[in-house]
Amino acid sequence: MRVRIDADLEKGTIERTELPESATWLGGRALADSILFEEVPPACHPLGPGNRLVFAPGFFAGTSMPTASRMSVAGKSPLTGGIKESNVGGMAGITLAQLGVGAVVIRGISPGPSLKLLVFRHGSAELMDAPELGGLGNYETVECLKKRFGDGAVILSTGPCGEMKMSAATIAVTDTNGRPCRHAGRGGLGGVMGSKGLKAVVMDPEGSQLRKGADPGAFAEAVKEYTKILQSSKRTAFWRENGTAALIDVSHARGSLPTRNFTSGAYDKKDRINSDRLKVLVAQRKGAMGHACMRGCIIRCSNIFNDPQGRYLTSGLEYETIAMMGSNLDIDDLDTIAQMDFRCDDYGIDTIETGATLGILTETDLFRFGDGERAIQLLDEIGKGTVLGRILGQGVTTTAKVFGIARIPAVKGQSLPAHEPRSLKGLGVTYAVSPQGADHTAGFVAEEPFSKEGHTERSRKAQINMVIADSLGLCQFTGLRDDYGLFARLIGALAGKIPSAEEVWRIGRDALWKERTFNQAAGIGPGQDRLPEFMRSEVLPPNNSAFDVEDQDLDRVFGDYP
Ligand code: SF4
């Protein structure tokens, strides 16, 4: 049995109900989408009392399935104004699921004055005051909470950026080492958490139990098959050995590495920030490659990056951060990028959105390419909440408005991630039409990267498959996408009722339809399913390609929706 916990911050009450039968096969993103679709008025203000914040472990979270315990964090986004799901690793998904929780719904706004904590122990949930945590960064917050609740506590928290309700604020999740370095980064859901007056969710794992399912034998058999696929995949070994930083070389080679504010797809100094360089520094300083962000991950793409004295600096230093704060800002030094990453994690601000924001700031005299010291100062302004910092913390679209900048790398208010759509046109289609705004995890399409044809169907399929993965709790790096038959057996053995392959596909299809419908009611229609104008008018070196997929093909992704 999985339960839903509703914490009403306004009334100070906790309600515990069983998930309904309609949620038998739902977890993660699909479950969060149905809750938001049914309960949140699409036109509500994202920071107002009508919005809800949902934490939903993936369907397989807390079972013996490896790399399948991720969690969805969802709500109406202050960044895009639409529905948002931000997928996160770390230990929260496993722990909530093993405490029997299928979804946590945060509603209402605390009347204050104290910040609140939501504390889970085996069989109980409770709201508590935490005035001492006001203004603290995520690292200090976690240290304080461990002193109060024990070293084993698993913690979700928001930093000062969330408390200041910034549109690019994140929610941190502690990893296998108990550090708040995994983030539900996109869409500003940290601002929604801050708006409710909730500083942290604390989970005491004592008494939590492995989920074995309705038919443990059949589930164990299917898990064996799934694990064999993962273990024998060349991708698994590749990510473990090289980390996601390996994508610096891959993106540079295909001309899709955002460089100097999206003016090039290749970076002449990429050898200073790529995986080879990262591995040398990690080895010299006794950090770690092949680190697992959550228990039970057999891919282990993450890392621990130490400073030159061998002291912990940040974890994990990932591709998106290295590209958006490295090549995109012409900062060619991994130590500087790692310091920026640490600050973003501590203040609780999205590295992708912030990298894009500092990129456009090069059009003003506030920042110039390659100035790592100034970049760190600007991040400190965000963390402190100076006037400039508060503007930057609203993300690339608001910053562009404030400074009169027209060349904005964003879709639906959310910045483009670190994959140039002019050299990956199928992914460009996903960026343009996804209800999530520009998001590389919404449905990655790498086939025929320079063709303008055939991406309508590819993107639709990739988006549906990604919703399924996000709903099941699978990490995107499993590479498993349309293995509907295997998923059906796993779901059936866990839930006690086996879906058909078609019903598995419908989990993704229906959730995506709900996201789209919610957005339309919130005022985000097909007219916003477009990439920024400059991506059509400016060709991108070194491939000299512009985005030229026809508008009618973008419109068909959902126009022809099955
Ligand atoms: S593959 Fe990487 S991101 Fe995915 S769960 Fe494992 S460590 Fe985390």
Image (cartoon, rainbow, N blue to C red):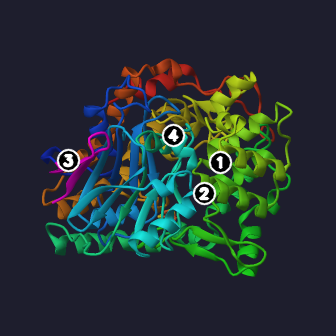
The magenta segment is: 1-19
x%, y% of residue 206?
29, 75
Crowd band around label 3 with a 10 angstrom C-alpha radius: few (<14), some (14–19), many (20+):
some
Q: Nearer the viewer, mark 1 or mark 3?
A: 1
Say which residue label 1 marks: 383
Give me the residue at 71% from left, 61% from top: 338
Q: CA distance from mark 2 to mark 1?
A: 9 Å
Quarter containing the N terminus: bottom left
x%, y% of residue 200?
42, 55
Q: Nearer the viewer, mark 3 or mark 4?
A: 4
Give me the residue at 49% from left, 60% from top: 477
Determine if the C-beta at disc 2 is less than 8 A from ligand 1. no
Say which residue label 2 marks: 346
Any part of residue 547 in sight? no
x%, y% of residue 151?
44, 76
Q: Are marks 2 and 1 in contact (CB under 8 Å)?
A: yes
First along the sequence among labels 1 and 4: 4
Compared with 279, 174 (above or below) is above
Q: Amino acid at mark 3?
A: Ala
Q: Nearer the viewer, mark 1 or mark 4?
A: 1
Quarter containing the C terminus: top left
Does residue 446 appear to the left or right of 45 in the view shown? right
Does residue 503 appear to the left or right of 237 in the view shown? left
Is residue 2 located in the magenta-colored stretch of the structure? yes
Q: Which mark is residue 23?
A: 3
In front: 54, or 85? Answer: 54
Q: CA distance from mark 1 to mark 3?
A: 39 Å
Does residue 531 appear to the left or right of 363 in the view shown? left
Crowd band around label 2 with a 10 angstrom C-alpha radius: few (<14), some (14–19), many (20+):
many
Crowd band around label 4 with a 10 angstrom C-alpha radius: few (<14), some (14–19), many (20+):
many
Q: Amino acid at mark 1?
A: Gly
